Amino acid sequence: MVIQTGIADFSSQRLRLAQTNSYTENKSDSNTDTTSTVHRQIDEADISLRGQMKSKLMSLREVQNNIEEASKMMETADKGIRAIVSILEKIKELAVQSANGIYTDSERQLFQVEISELIDEVDRISSSTEYNSMALFQGDFSRYSRVASMWLHIGPNQHERERIYLSTMTAQSLDLKYEDATVLSVSTPEEAKETLHTLLYSISRTQKQLADITGYSERFKEAQIKVRSEIETLEKALGENGGT
């Protein structure tokens, strides 16, 4: 992201006008009006360019705030998706145990009860992971959503923006729960093996979403560094020429 500050143009413009001023001052007193005009041109150019620089600085500060908010939102999403991944890994462990022939039906039933509770927890996390009252994993911001889209500006120009995709992470969307509200079963070794096969898909989806969130966060960090550098450059330039 390259942002033109106009600082170099500012310096060269003042140099040109200063050279004209020096030449004018060597002329006779009859050219006093011309000298005043040149001074006025220098002042007007100074004021105009400083105004442009201040405007750019305000824009960059707004962008910086946007990026900070986006980073906080990704932190919230990261915590939520990691919690879901952890639950899926726990369900997988229980399914592996249930697929082992050494356990009795009553023991598998205990596994089933725990798995059902964990699946309910996936739905709880999916619905409660919010940022500024926006549910992040209910599908509103998925790639194929017709409800909403999330675009985040990470630069002062119109094209400098990033679209965020957050997939639906409900138990049903992850194939942990069916439309009739029944859940994955580990009541028999055979069902436990089928459940393991389904979990491979579920875990893969959540890990993909986690990788995407990590990628967004990294890009926001890079953008923040660039914007902060431009802000510091403009603040220094304005400070050196009389402050903001």
Image: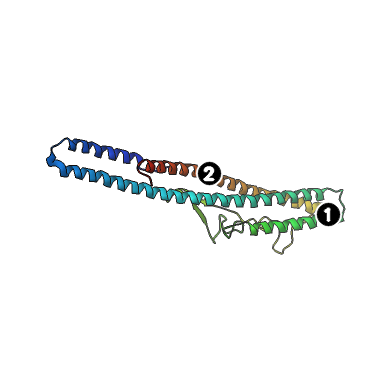
In terms of secondary structure, where does tag 2 sit? helix
Circle nearer the viewer, 1 or 2: 2
The percent position of residue 57, horizontal first and vertical second, equals 41, 48
Horizontal relation, residue 18 to residue 141: left or right: left
Q: Residue at the spot x=52%, y=46% of the render?
A: 220
Horizontal relation, residue 101 to residue 55: left or right: right
- Furthest-bottom residue in view? 180
Q: Residue at the spot x=64%, y=50% of the render?
A: 79
Viewer-proximal residue among 196 and 212: 212
**Tag 2 residue:** 221
Residue 156 seen: no
Residue 108's disc is: 1
In terms of secondary structure, where does tag 1 sit? helix
Image quadrant assignment for residue 243: top left
Query: Could you tell me which quadrant the N terminus lies in?
Result: top left
The percent position of residue 237, horizontal first and vertical second, equals 38, 41
Q: Name the amino acid type tagged 1.
A: Arg
The percent position of residue 100, horizontal first and vertical second, equals 83, 48
Number of other residues with Cα within 10 Å of mark 1, as a class: few under 14, some 14 to 19, many 20 or more: many
Q: Name the amino acid type tagged 2.
A: Lys
Q: Residue at the spot x=72%, y=63% of the render?
A: 181
